[in-house]
Image (cartoon, rainbow, N blue to C red):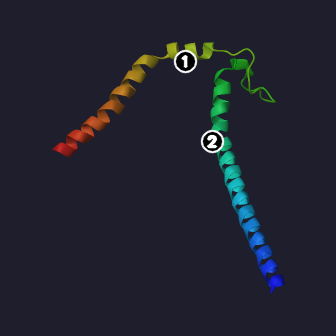
Amino acid sequence: MEHSSSLSVSRLRLSLTSRRFARVFSATLIHVILLAGMILVFLPVGWALSTSLKEPGDLFLFPPIWIPNPLHWQNYVEAMTTVPFGRYFLNTALLTGSGPRISRAQRRA
């Protein structure tokens, strides 16, 4: 009788250990998948930011340089002054701000 109870205790321990392993394994797998997804999403954003801070001659170097030295902040100044960026921003703000108001007014009518 004692042999059978020790056998059931060892099965219970094995069952708890395998459940714990399954829980840890599934949590690790989920985190690895989420990390891979995050890298896939943020890699192009990082590349765009890196490219925006390079001098024009450095854009097509191979192998590419991720962190340009020196940082060329003048690209942002040129982008804001070459076209009327302030006017474009104002137009966008007015259009996106008026959309909810128009929608609300249509629901009231």
Using the image, tell me which numbered label, if any, was put on residue 45: none
Quarter of the image with the N terminus is: bottom right
Query: 36 and 96: which one is in front?
Result: 36
Looking at marks 1 and 2 on the same chain, the residue that comes earlier in the sequence is marked by 2
Q: Quadrant of residue 75?
A: top right
Which residue lies under the disc numbered 1?
A: 79
In x, y percent, where is residue 17?
A: 76, 65
Number of the label disc, if any, that sits on residue 41: 2
Question: Going by the image, does 62 lie left or right of 33?
Answer: right
Q: Counting other residues with Cα less than 10 Å from the Cα at mark 1, is it few (<14), some (14-19), or many (20 or more)?
A: few
Q: Is residue 100 above or below residue 52?
A: below
Cβ atoms under marks 1 and 2 closer than 8 Å: no
Q: Amino acid at mark 2?
A: Val
User: Marks 1 and 2: which is nearer the front?
Assistant: 2
For badge 1, the amino acid type reads: Ala
As helix, strand or loop, the secondary structure at mark 2 comes to helix
Q: Position of residue 18 (x, y in %)?
A: 75, 67
Q: Residue furthest bottom?
A: 1
For the image shown, how many numbered marks are present on the structure? Answer: 2
Residue 58 in the image, given as x and y percentages of width and height? 74, 21
Q: Nearer the viewer, residue 17 or 21?
A: 17
| Nearest to the observer: residue 25 or residue 84 | 25
Q: Position of residue 30 (x, y in %)?
A: 67, 54
For disc 2, the neighbor class at 10 Å (few under 14, some 14 to 19, many from 20) is few
**Relative to 63, residue 18 above or below:** below
Q: Is residue 19 above or below residue 78?
A: below
* Quadrant of residue 72 within the rendered picture: top right
Side (left or right) of 104 relative to 25:
left
